Structures are given as structure tokens and as C-alpha cells.
Image (cartoon, coloured by chain):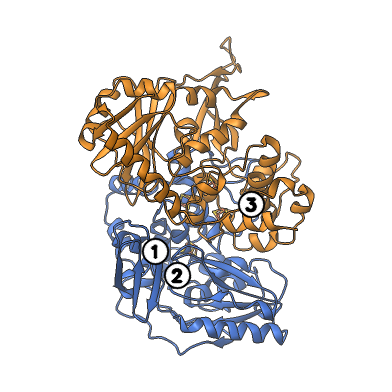
Chain colours: A orange, B blue
Amino acid sequence: MTEKVFTKEEWLGTLETLKESYKLFGPVKDGDFHTFMPLDGNKKPDFDYENTRLSPKSVIYPESERMFEYSLDESEEDAHILKESPKDYSPCAVLGIRPCDAQAFQIVKRNFDNPEYQDPWWTQHFEATTLVGLGCNAPCATCFCTQVGGGPFHEAGLDVLLFDLGDRFLAKGITEKGDALLEKTAGNPADDAALAAAEALKQPARDKITATVPTDQLKDKVTNELFDAPFWEEVAFACLNCGTCTYLCPTCWCFDIQDEVQGNQGDRIRNWDSCMFPLFSLHGSGHNPRADKFQRVRQRFMHKLKYYVDKYQNGVQCSGCGRCVRYCPVNIDIRNVCKLMNDFA
Amino acid sequence: MLKYTEKIRETAKRLLAEKKVDVFIGYRKGTVPMMNEPLLVNHPDKVDPLYWDNFCGLNLCNYLTKRTDKIGIIANGCNSRNIVTHIIENQIKRDQLYIVGIPCEGMIDHRAVVRAVKFKEILGVHQNGAEFTVKGHDFEETFEKNKFLQSNCAVCTHRNPVIYDEMLGDPVDEQTDVNPYSDVEKIEAMDPEKKQGFFTRLISRCIRCYACRNACPLCYCPTCFVDESTPQWVGKSVDPTDTMTFHFLRAYHCAGRCTDCGACERVCPMGISMRQFTKKLNKDTRELFSWEAGLDPEKRPPLDVYRPDDYNDFIK
Ligand code: SF4
Ligand code: SF4
Ligand code: SF4
Ligand code: SF4
């Protein structure tokens, strides 16, 4: 396990070296918000940030990804044959990812990479990626990672964890992948003062998270009773069925597959989809099993807080990042809905 | 503004108790600063969460579409104009509604507040008259409300409800010295290439979540053209052409109907000013047809009438 310290300038400097081995992504100030962007050209990462508005899930799971290409030109021998589109699996590293967002990849992994099913593109992108986390010295009021199995300095899911010590960063390798990345960096071996300072950050940060979001009863609820609970209409009233909560969420994974054809050339693309959209569940027959708004809202919460819990026996499908709480335009707060579900008798 | 909260609760309680309405639609105070949640109350004992402040920038008319019950609803200027448009377009009947009017002094632009405190986390916002105070972990700052209005509110000329059954306060003075279209004029003056560049940049961050469409009371089509799949009119990936198609077409569908309530912009998670599209069409309908949407339930909107004796030459 490698532990190194860098002054902040050294850290930024060493990123230039890392660019030789990795395609780097980092939080870049983009208008009013930060966004994870490829650090190419003169894009500078800014590690003095709370969290990005869009989660970094797109690094591994792009909003639109070309899966296959095909030709409709009958004169060609391989007309109508799907051929996999070339993809870039060269090593990349996400710098400054928050522990909740790294944990989110673990949550999503149970869906995209399990014994029954392996999504070829998600898994390969994931394997090519090294996650360099940045612990949260000052979690936001909307954060609740500690309530869902994580924490401001939670290591699981990360390859490296950075501690912001004010004028320096302490980098701690967590996995072999992480150590391999740190080997390519400058920096000095961590001194005792740095290690102690890093340790001292943990508890105060945890204490800043005051939300209580109990999830302990969810697994014992009878699915159909929760499904028929009387509160769904009320929970859903204000919802606009926009896709904001699902698109911003690091643990939402649903996609839609579309063919786009221009002339004789076709692409098969997968795009993020959202259970909030009526089209999401529209059958070819025209029937829609979730035709009403409240059914779609119920689906989002039932999936995250009940179906996932039962299927994978590994907690909820939420890493407590708080994005949906902050950005839902009508303030539907998952922390309150989770309480309603957990307390439902 | 806060003074209305008590009045709203009393009124809702009375209307529900007297069975004048089956339900009452208003706001509840949000769980995060500067965010309020639209709320439906169906019993006189449940009116206490009702709340009103300068962050009620959504459009409650959105929640009326095709309801069949008798509804009490809060309406400020723009919301009342959308209610009128809803009545004209047969989305709700006038006699189903009990409209509780609130003279409006403008909603605060929450994004501008976040910028003003340099993106530090805001833990609470308190209003006191013409000022409001923002608190965070290690700061407290007071601002003048009028400098932080949503951009549509800053140029609004219909702050008082245009239709109501009861008013909760005295009418406010309407603004007369504002030019609502100075931003549109700037775009109009650009050459086509510059315009193209401007619009491309404007929507470059759009993630096609459709929050703007869904927050808009005008966008009540059972299936939006972007959601049609047989046939499919618009591609679903984040291709800029498809995104542009969505924005242009939606704006055209709102021509002569949009009240510039600002709900679309308020809800966009990416902070996109898509009102730049709808405003141009508002300006056009004003210049070509002397029309402003939602002022009179008895008048048909310009784009759904044909008159052989139309005074406009270009239409003949
Ligand atoms: S819960 Fe909020 S963010 Fe999610 S679809 Fe509904 S209105 Fe949009
Ligand atoms: S459900 Fe909300 S809080 Fe949970 S991971 Fe998704 S965006 Fe974050
Ligand atoms: S709300 Fe914003 S991001 Fe979503 S579709 Fe509209 S403009 Fe695009
Ligand atoms: S287009 Fe935007 S400003 Fe116009 S009525 Fe709809 S939500 Fe309001």
C-alpha cells in the first residue's frame, strides 16, 4: 500500500506525467458548476469543489454510446450484419471522484457485472478505469452517505484516496490498480504528521452528516404491501416526471436502444433512459403498464429502496450523494420517501 | 410576501371546510433552501404545511391539466395567465376553479443567489421585506431582493392576477418602464452564422431530460413529439441536431401561448436559458398580432383563428 504526499503544485505537476499513461478526467469548473471532463488541452482540474452536478458515471457509461454499426446497402456482402463499433478502452483515471460516487460504481456493478450477465462495454470501461478519490472534509447538508453504508472517507470502490490537508494532498493507494498509478507519480513518502492529519479529518467530517435515513426495515417489508402503500399519490403529486433525478444519479443505470440510420449507414446506439418517462415502459401493443405519473415515481423509489435490496442483498441502490435532493426542481426528497417506506407498517 | 402564508392557510381551510373545493393546490416549504414543493391538500386539517415566499417560481397551473374535481389554486400574475390559457384550450373549466389571487413582486433567482455567495453552500435563506439574508457555515450576507429577481420577473408587466375569485392582498404597481425583449433584440441583430453559434452554445449542455417541457403548463400533449416512436420524429441520442430540433419545435408549439412565467428555466438542471427561444415568439406574436397570452378567457389566440377580414396583410 503506497502512501505519498504532494504539495498541491506537485500534485498538479505530476498529473502532466500521468497523462502519458492515462486519459485523465477531473472536475473542471464549467459555468456555475463542476463537471468531470477529459483533462486534455489546457483544461485544469479544480479540486476545491463540493461535488459535480452530473455524476461521473458517464466516464464508464456514456449518455449515448454507439454499440454497433451496419450497412443497409444490399450490394455489400455484409449488409444488415451488426458489427461492433470501435471503442476506446485505453487506461483512464478519474481524479477527485467523491467516495459516494465511487461506491455508486460498486452498486451499479452488481447489475452490469454479475455471474448471470456481464455487460461487455460497461465492464471493459470499468476495468480500464482507475478511481482516484478525494475525501470530503466538508460534506454538504444534502449528503447522507453514512446512512447508506458509505462515508466521507469511505475507501471501498476507490483505487486511491486523497486527503486534502490544506497545503498538501496525502494519497493512499487502496488497490493494486491504485498503487500502480501512484508509482508513476512524483511525491514523497508520507510522513507521520501527514498520516495523523489525514486520520484527524475523518470523524469531524462524519459528524457533519446529520441526516438520518433509516433503511434497516426495508428488506422485511412485504413488497406488494409497500407497492400498494397509500402514500404514493401524495409523494408523486408535485413530480414533473422530468428525468433530472435519474440522469444526475450515479446509481441509475437504465438505457434504451435506438437505431439511427443515415442513407445506407446505420448505428445502434444506447442512450440513458429514465423510468420517469412514459416511453420507458410503453409496450409495442400500445399498452403502458406505468401510464400514470405516480406509478413511475413509485417505480423509481421501489427499485432503489426495495427491489434492489431484495435482489442483491447488499443495501440500497443509492449512495447518498444527495444530487436528486438538491436538483429535483420540485423538491421531492428521497430521504423523506425512504423514511416513509422504512416506517411503513 | 411571507405574510401571505397565513392568509393562504386560512383561505384553504375555509374553502375546504365549506366544501367550495375538493382540493387546494399551493406550495409547501422545501427541505433544501430556495426550493418549495407544490402541494395538494384535500382536508381542512391538513392546511398547515401550505407556504408562500419568493421561491415559488414553478407554475401551479401545470397541476390542473384534465383534473375533474373542484380545485382551489393559488395564482400570481403569470400563473393566472396560464390558467386563462388552460381554460381557452379546454384543459380545465372555469367553474371547476376557485382562484386565490396573489399580487406578485417577483420570484428570486436561486442560481443568482448561489453565484452571489460564490458557490458556498447555503444552509438557510430568510426574507425580511425588500431584503433577504443568506446563511452558510461561516458566512451571512444580506441582499436586496429586487437585484435578484428571476429574469422573467424583472421584466414582468402583469404581476397582478388577471383572473381570480378572491385576492389575498392589494394589487401591486405594474412595471411600465421595462423592455422585456432587449435580450431578443440582441439576438435578432446577429447575422445567421452568429445566431447559429449562439443557439448551439446556448443548448450545448442540454441532457434532454425534458424538465423544461414537463414544468411548462403548455406542454400537456398526451405524447410529446420527441416521445413519439411510431413514427419517430427526433433522434434520442445527444446529437446536437436532435437537441436543437427539440428546442425549436417546442418553442414553436408555445407561440402565442407562453406567458414567460420562467418555470422552464427555473427547473433546468443544467441552467439553460431556453426562454431565449420562446421569448422571440412572444415578441413576434406581440408585434404581428398585438397579442399577449392569457389575458382574456373570451379571446381566441392568434394561431387558432382565421378571419377573412384579418387586418394583417401578410396572412391573406
Ligand atoms: S422526482 Fe423530481 S427530479 Fe425526479 S422526475 Fe420527479 S420532478 Fe423530476
Ligand atoms: S438516488 Fe439521489 S442521493 Fe441516491 S445516489 Fe441517486 S442521486 Fe444520489
Ligand atoms: S430542462 Fe434543460 S437539460 Fe433538460 S431538456 Fe430542458 S434544456 Fe435540456
Ligand atoms: S415556455 Fe417556459 S416561460 Fe413559457 S409558459 Fe412554458 S414554462 Fe412558462
Task: Mark 2: give few (<14), some (14-19) or many (20+) Cα within 10 Å.
Answer: many
Side of A108 where B69 appears, left or right: right
Residue to which mark 2 is pinned:
B55
Q: Looking at the figure, which quarter contains the C terminus of chain A? A: bottom right
The answer to whether A218 is drawn above or below residue B292 in the figure is: above
C-alpha distance separating marks 1 and 3: 31 Å
Nearest to viewer (mark 3 / mark 2): 2
Precedes in sequence: disc 2 or disc 1? 2
Instruction: Work out whether residue B241 or residue B69 is closer to the camera in this orientation and state it.
Output: B69
Which secondary structure, mark 3? Answer: loop
Residue to which mark 1 is pinned:
B110
Q: Position of residue B241 (x, y in %)?
A: 44, 40
Image quadrant where residue A240 sits: bottom right
| Residue type (three-letter) at the residue carrying disc 2 | Phe
Which secondary structure, mark 2? Answer: loop
* Tag 3 subunit: B
Dots 2, 1 in contact, CB < 8 A: yes
Residue at the extreme top of the image, as rendered: A77
Task: Mark 1: give few (<14), some (14-19) or many (20+) Cα within 10 Å.
Answer: some
Which secondary structure, mark 1? Answer: helix
- Residue A288 appears in the figure: no
Residues marked 2 and 1, same chain: yes
The answer to whether B103 is drawn above or below residue A80 in the figure is: below
* Tag 1 subunit: B
- Residue at 48 percent across and 88 percent down: it is B169
Instruction: Work out whether residue B314 or residue B283 is closer to the camera in this orientation and state it.
Output: B283
* Tag 2 subunit: B
Residue to which mark 3 is pinned:
B223
Q: Looking at the figure, which quarter contains the N terminus of chain A? A: top left
Image quadrant where residue A117 sits: top right
- Residue at 49 percent across and 77 percent down: it is B76
